[in-house]
Image (spheres, rainbow, N blue to C red):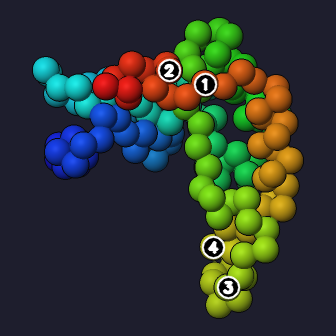
Amino acid sequence: MAFDVLERAGYRYSSSLYPTRYIPEAPQFAFYPARGRKFMEIPVSSVRRFGLSLPCGGGGFFRLFPYWVSAQSIRLLTRQEKRPCIFYFHPWEIDAGQPRIAEASLKSRLRHYTNIGKMPARLEQLLAQFRWKRLDNIYPVAAS
């Protein structure tokens, strides 16, 4: 299992799961994949709405959807559900000057380049609008 490999490599946690419509059965809360272990899986945040598990923890969804969609979902998660938001983005998503691959399919170009120039401002707004902490300050296993 991938969790075993990560733990043997010295990792204490992973945020490999993103419980959205692609993996709807994935847990939405932090969990230990096996008893007696210190390794913890901390899924990227999603919220349950309209019977669906919808993304709110970053990645392409943050870049592609209007900002208010993510902000509203994070508010729901943190205020109503009292859960921290586990958020991520890829470094290339803040590099508007990256080379463009003209040979990529239209679908790939739309997914990869849409709103890439807006990412720095969106991240600044997100950092100003919400209070953030390091993962190891929220989940002590990450510090051990």
Q: Earlier in the sequence, mark 4 or mark 1?
A: 4
Check if mark 3's residue and mark 4's residue have beta carbons within 8 Å.
Answer: yes
Q: Does 78 sit left or right of 2 as displayed?
A: right
Q: Earlier in the sequence, mark 4 or mark 2?
A: 4
As drawn, which residue projects farthest toward the left?
A: 36
Query: Callout 3, which amino acid?
Result: Ile
Q: Which of 72 and 92 is in front in this view?
A: 92
When asked about the image quadrant of residue 104, the answer is bottom right
Would you call the spot at circle 3 few (<14 residues within 10 Å), some (14-19), or many (20 or more)? few
On the question of residue 25 being in view, the answer is no
Q: Residue at x 63, y 58 (%)?
A: 91
Real-space Cα distance between discs 4 and 1? 33 Å
Q: Nearer the viewer, residue 28 or 139?
A: 139
Q: Mark 2 points at which residue?
A: 137
Query: Callout 4, which amino acid?
Result: Ser
Query: Callout 2, which amino acid?
Result: Asn
Query: Callout 1, which amino acid?
Result: Lys
Real-space Cα distance between discs 3 and 4? 10 Å
Check if mark 1's residue and mark 3's residue have beta carbons within 8 Å.
Answer: no
* Circle number at residue 101: 3
* Circle number at residue 133: 1
Q: Position of residue 66 (x, y in %)?
A: 82, 44
Q: Does 127 sit left or right of 136 as displayed?
A: right
Q: Which of 52 and 142 is in front in this view?
A: 142
Real-space Cα distance between discs 2 and 1? 7 Å
